[in-house]
Amino acid sequence: MPGSSPLVAFIRDRLQRQGPVPFPWLMEQALYHSEFGYYTATTGPRIGRQGDYYTNVSVGPLYGQILASQIIEMWKILGSPSQFTVVEEGVEDGLLAMDILSALTEQSIEAAESICYIILEPIPRKRLQQQARFEPAFLKRVQWLSGLADLEGVIGAFVSNELIDAMPVHLVVYRDQQWSELLVDISGEGFCFVPGKIRLPALARALAKLPLPLSSPYTTEVNLAAARWIQSLSTKLERGFVLIADYGYPRAEYYKAERTEGTLSCYTRHRRSYNPLERLGEIDISAHVDFTALAEAAGEAGLKVAGYADQHHFMVGAAEARLLAFEKAVETEGFAKAKPAFLGQYRTLMHPGNMGMAFKFLLLTKGINTNPQLTGFKYSPDPWKSLAERL
């Protein structure tokens, strides 16, 4: 029964007092409410076979190993500094951080000793859970902070893995040659969407960039939180990189005419649904990333777009040396001794029919005069050519 949930009662009380609200507020409560949100209150596993969805990290340690190799390349591009900071936000259980730290030690002792790993985690309970998972040797190299505001100037790299897709988005609908924002209102014991005027100037500006004509009605999302986040992040990065991995599209593909219902999705026990107003606090809610809008926001924030690739091409480039070493080991030692687990994880990560085309990588830089050539982007075209295609 909808009314039995404390979160639903909290939201109903707000709506009864103040009227319909934009969807970002409701999505914020559903995912991040301090007591009842999906990411804050859920105690069981969310990722992997026993959870609600799979991620690159749940495939195995190879993903973290490949990101570690990219971090080492970044460290070398900056001149192998004695202090290099890696910042990760939205780390969930901390497994990616552990995979990266373990791989750094294996791949380059000098780089590993230079790196300070900072985890941004605003929820005290989750910080304690993450810290309990780390080995003592890693704890010495990891620092926990509540958020971007607590960071001092960073020389190094920000690593964002499936963070932006969980940022609250505005829902909008195009009907009768004009845009309306979908607001959340009370309907019986549950909730419903009602159309409202576009009131935020930033939302109006974002909508003006979307390709027309569109079919009517046409429902989709706009992520203004991502632009604010990249602006805040840029103020903290003195010199270095931002590496973003998430699922999404360039603007022209995101808002193509046939995508009439947008990308907003809900997940529980690996089942996908499309009603974000049901089971609030119990299910994951996410939307794909508009990478063109994110790149434009990065440029406005003083960051340079240095690379954009789908995961298939990123993995081909970033893991090329590792793949060649594996093939050589098979020739000399035989398949059984050549760590065959690598091959299975690699195929899953790069396969075009699996994760290879769903996820995209965006590389941003600041304070670097040359055009850095990370191996993960060696087989991708000019980033702006891909991001602005058909616009």
Image (cartoon, rainbow, N blue to C red):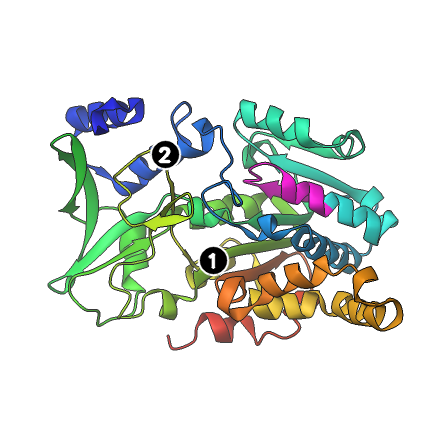
Foreground of the two, 359 or 241: 359
Tag 2: residue type?
A: Glu
Q: Residue at x 21, y 23 (%)?
A: 13
Q: Residues within 10 Å of mark 2 (few under 14, many from 20)?
A: many
- Give the image location of residue 230, x and y in percent: 50, 49
Mark 2 or mark 1: which comes first in sequence? 1
Label 2 residue SS: loop
Q: Can I make out residue 168 in this image? A: yes
Tag 1: residue type?
A: Tyr
Q: Residue at x 62, y 38 (%)?
A: 94
Contact, CB < 8 Å: mark 2 with mark 1? no
How many labels, in total?
A: 2
Q: Is residue 97 magenta?
A: yes
Q: Quadrant of residue 87?
A: top right
- Give the image location of residue 96, x and y in percent: 64, 45
Q: Quadrant of residue 347?
A: bottom right
Q: Can I make out residue 81 in this image? A: no
Q: Quadrant of residue 333?
A: bottom right
Quarter holding the C terminus is bottom left
Q: Is residue 331 above or below residue 67?
A: below
The residue carrying mark 2 is: 282
Q: Residue at x 18, y 33 (%)?
A: 190
Q: Which residues are magenta?
A: 86-100
Quarter holding the N terminus is top left
The residue carrying mark 1 is: 247
Q: Nearer the viewer, mark 2 or mark 1?
A: 2
Report, in whole angstroms, how far the alpha carbon at label 2 lies from the one at label 1: 22 Å
Q: Is residue 223 magenta?
A: no
Foreground of the two, 19 or 139: 139
- Give the image location of residue 156, x and y in percent: 70, 48
